[in-house]
Amino acid sequence: MDTPVETLSFEDALKELEAIVHRLETGDETLDKSIGLYERGDKLRARCAERLDQAQARIEAIRLDADGRPAGTRPFVAG
C-alpha cells in the first residue's frame, strides 16, 4: 500500500482498490483510517480510469479500410 499509485499497473491498482473496498465495507476501521483508505482508493480509481482511457485510445487508433475491416494501425500518441 506504500507503492506510489502512478507506478501501479492496472491489475495491481484494481486489486488494491478491491481490497480497500472490502476493508471499508466491513466497518472495522477507525474513522481516520477509513478516510485514509478512501483517499487512497480514490487515487487508485483514477489510475484505473486513466489506464482504461489509454487502452481505449490505442484501440481506436486501429485504422479501418473502406469495408470497415482493420487495415493497420497508426501510432498512439498519449496526450
Image (cartoon, rainbow, N blue to C red):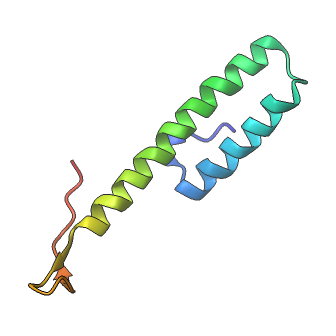
Indicate the position of residue 3 as horizontal and vertical percent values. 61, 41
- Where 64 falls versus 1 (above or below)? below
- Left or right, residue 55 beside residue 71: right
- Where 74 falls versus 5 (above or below)? below
Indicate the position of residue 17 as horizontal and vertical percent values. 66, 42
The number of numbered badges drawn on the structure is 0
Residue at the extreme right: 28
Report the residue at 19% width, 58% height from top: 77
Report the residue at 21% width, 47% height from top: 79
- Where 4 falls versus 67 (above or below)? above
- Left or right, residue 53 beside residue 19: left
Report the residue at 43% width, 54% height from top: 52
Q: Quadrant of residue 1?
A: top right
Q: Quadrant of residue 44?
A: top right
Indicate the position of residue 65 as horizontal and vertical percent values. 12, 84
Q: Quadrant of residue 70?
A: bottom left
43 or 66, nearer to the observer: 66
